[in-house]
């Protein structure tokens, strides 16, 4: 186990965004984190990334609490835009290189080229899909042990999504762990080893994708519909 969330809970005022979530992530696995809007996916990722502190319970990486050390090895891609508008694609790379010791400029160049971005493009002129690609490139150019990608495929057109998922997966080492949240279940189904289903702040199911296919002849999308469409009785 590389990361453990034990009863992690986060409240904002009277709202419990993440409610006693316990789970274990194994090295080398790709996890899809699914759930309707507001189910707590982003908040859980932010806790694992060390950007938000749990009110109770906690998350441990390599058996140590999340903190300065874990942040060096856990890369988080947020849904929020986080580049200054004056920056070019080249500036974004330099900015990241200054921040993160594990940032590889060589890998960044490979990624931006494969995503058809050029160094002279300005952040403020990028379309939302191009901005999404830039965020992926700059995150995946880190040599992290865990990548937490919050809705990486948002704004990216249908044909580019598969290509981008392939680029993401091809750019990581075999022992690297990924958690990817998305509402685009079909794209995640093709790459995920396991699925984490969130609802109203709770982790309500965890399934291995292969087992689901073999023993229950179900897709992740089938199970998603059963869980969220019919009151959560489905098993996996
Ligand atoms: N900074 C905040 N202040 C107040 N409430 C918040 C804050 N961040 C999240 N919440 C609330 O916590 C709950 C969980 O939000 P979160 O963004 O974690 O869900 P999500 O599953 O990522 O949603 P989505 O799929 O829409 O991105 C929501 O009800 C949201 O309104």
Image (tube, rainbow, N blue to C red):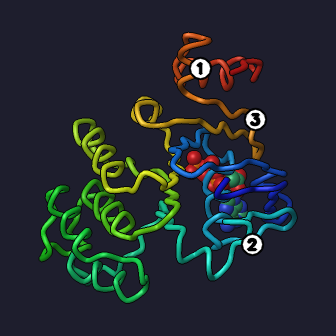
Point out which mark residue 204 bears.
3
- Disc with the residue nearer the chain's start (3 vs 1): 3
Quadrant of the image occupied by residue 209: top right
Residue at x 34%, y 52% (from the top left corner): 168
* Image coordinates for residue 210, horizontal then vertical, percent: 53, 24
Query: Mark 2 to mark 1: distance in Å?
Result: 33 Å
Point out which mark residue 202 bears.
none
- Disc with the residue nearer the chain's start (3 vs 2): 2
Nearer to me, 184 or 180:
180
* Image coordinates for residue 5, horizontal then vertical, percent: 75, 56
Residue 150 as seen in the image, left or right of residue 16: left
Query: Mark 3 to mark 2: distance in Å?
Result: 24 Å
Indicate which quadrant contains ligand 1. Answer: bottom right
Q: Do residues under tags 2 and 1 come within 8 Å of each other at their CB atoms?
A: no
Point out which mark residue 65 bears.
2
According to the image, label 1 marks what residue?
212
Query: Mark 3 to mark 1: distance in Å?
Result: 16 Å
Nearer to me, 228 or 217:
217
Number of numbered discs on residues: 3
Nearer to me, 138 or 39:
138
């Amino acid at each position: 186990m590389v990361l453990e969330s034990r009863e992690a809970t986060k409240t904002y005022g009277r709202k419990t965004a993440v409610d006693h979530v316990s789970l274990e992530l194994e090295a080398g696995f790709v996890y899809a984190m699914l759930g309707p809007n507001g189910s707590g996916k982003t908040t859980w990722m932010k806790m694992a990334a060390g950007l938000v502190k749990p009110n109770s319970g906690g998350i441990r990486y390599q058996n140590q609490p999340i903190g300065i050390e874990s942040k060096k090895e856990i890369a988080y891609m947020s849904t929020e835009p986080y580049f200054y508008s004056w920056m070019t694609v080249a500036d974004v790379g330099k900015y990241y290189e200054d921040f993160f010791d594990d940032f590889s400029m060589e890998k960044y160049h490979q990624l931006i080229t494969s995503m058809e971005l050029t160094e002279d493009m300005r952040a403020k002129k990028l379309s939302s899909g191009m901005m999404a690609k830039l965020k992926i490139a700059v995150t995946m150019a880190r040599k992290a042990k865990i990548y937490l990608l919050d809705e990486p495929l948002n704004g990216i057109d249908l044909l580019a999504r598969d290509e981008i998922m392939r680029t993401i997966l091809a750019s990581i080492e075999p022992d690297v762990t990924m958690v990817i949240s998305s509402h685009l279940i079909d794209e995640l189904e093709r790459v995920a080893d396991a699925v984490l289903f969130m609802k109203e702040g709770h982790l309500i199911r965890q399934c291995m994708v292969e087992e689901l296919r073999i023993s229950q002849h179900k897709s992740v999308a089938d199970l998603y519909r059963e869980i969220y469409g019919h009151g959560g009785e489905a098993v996996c």
